[in-house]
Amino acid sequence: MSDYLPFTRPSIDAATIEGVAEVLRSGWITTGPQAKAFESRLSQYFGGRPVRALASGTGALELALAIAGVGPGDEVVTTPLSWVATANVVLRAGARPVFADIDPATRNIDPARIEAALTPRTKALIPVDMAGLPFDRDAVYAIARRRSLRVIEDAAQSMGATWNGRRVGSFGDLACFSFHANKNMTTAEGGCLVLDDEAEAARCERLRLQGVVRLAGGEIEVEEAGAKMNLTDVAARIGLGQLERLEEFNARRRILARRYFERLDRSLGCGLPPADFERSNWHMFQVLLPLERITIDRARFIALMHERGIGVGVHYPAMHLFALYRAQGWKAGDFPHAEHVGASIVTLPLFPAMQDGDVDRVCRALGDILAAHCR
Ligand SMILES: *Cc1c(COP(=O)(O)O)cnc(C)c1O
């Protein structure tokens, strides 16, 4: 399986590897000048907004919740179709995640259903840009303004995506990005929080490192218990090399996604993602398997693709059906759209180093397997 095609793989260039080696040799490997430089490049990228680099996207969500003042007794409305981090952070803040179903066309939270999920306890919304397709900023922010709610954008997957021609993260309330190895740009593990106010950025900076405040004269003070979520210089140096190439990476992803649309046989009955080449950063190319038309289940489909040397992922099962969330009263039938997508979705290979022919190979394998197991 030397030509095994994974569903994703990061592209780290030689200059970045050399840069990381220099950092390792420099004698300063944790948070320092590289992290500072990375933050300043990120801030430029987001139109000058304050940015703080963090150890993970989950960390960004946790600090955003703290900054939004979300705690015990509060509710946060979010989507059931996301990586489980999105709702776990709400529980860890001592608050209650309240799910609102997705719009099956976009696979993002349905703004109309957010309205129905609001209560007097709602303090914030966490909409997610699933697969890098931006959630409807106009509709979500209209609700947030009307109800005085904070918006914590889970933009973990949407680095480089745009809404009405503006970069995700360059406007709006708190925006959380992840630089996990599978995301469109990576620091191996890492993330950042984009804020809209210098005072909140200063709070974020304290909260990411034990709550420490540095005073003039070299003294320190601590007024609240912070976390340990700083980004290392080793990671930041990877991020600097990646950010430089992000537009190129995303352009390549877009070309490959277009090719999927051209090559996928529509008669197979797979549910396709929205053909959005304007706003999405094509973090993932995901189709819904026509399970009602075939005799195999998703696990078998994935195993058969694997036998043909092709990696397929599942992102994500509907979150409210995990034991943790069932224990809080959520159950099958609560969110039919998220449940249908969560049960039938598969992530096909898509990453910048893929060749056009790889897309053709995936489409052929998918076509063969579905055709061979037709009801
Ligand atoms: C990756 C991801 C996260 C978490 O980011 P980490 O860097 O892995 O902590 C949160 N939400 C979504 C939607 C993600 O895809």
Image (cartoon, rainbow, N blue to C red):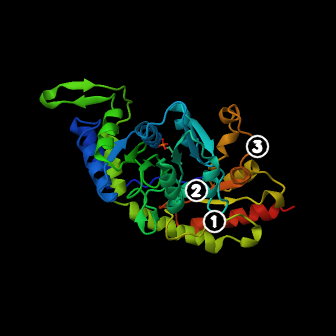
Question: Where does the image place residue 130, in percent across and percent down from the top left?
Answer: 56, 55
Q: For this rendering, which residue is in front, 183 or 73?
A: 73
Cβ–Cβ below 8 Å for labels 3 and 1?
no
Q: Quadrant of residue 234?
A: top left
Q: Quadrant of residue 189?
A: top left
Indicate which disc, 2 or 3, sits on the residue closer to the N terminus: 2
Q: Residues within 10 Å of mark 1 (few under 14, many from 20)?
A: some
Q: Which mark is residue 5?
A: 2
Q: Nearer the viewer, mark 2 or mark 3?
A: 3
Q: Is residue 82 left or right of residue 237?
A: right
Cβ–Cβ below 8 Å for labels 1 and 2?
yes
Which residue position is annotated with label 1? Answer: 361
Spatial separation of the CA atoms under disc 2 and disc 3: 34 Å
Question: Where does the image place residue 255, in percent across and percent down from the top left?
Answer: 51, 70
Indicate which disc, 3 or 1, sits on the residue closer to the N terminus: 3
**Is residue 18 shown to the viewer in this render?**
yes
Which residue position is annotated with label 3? Answer: 332
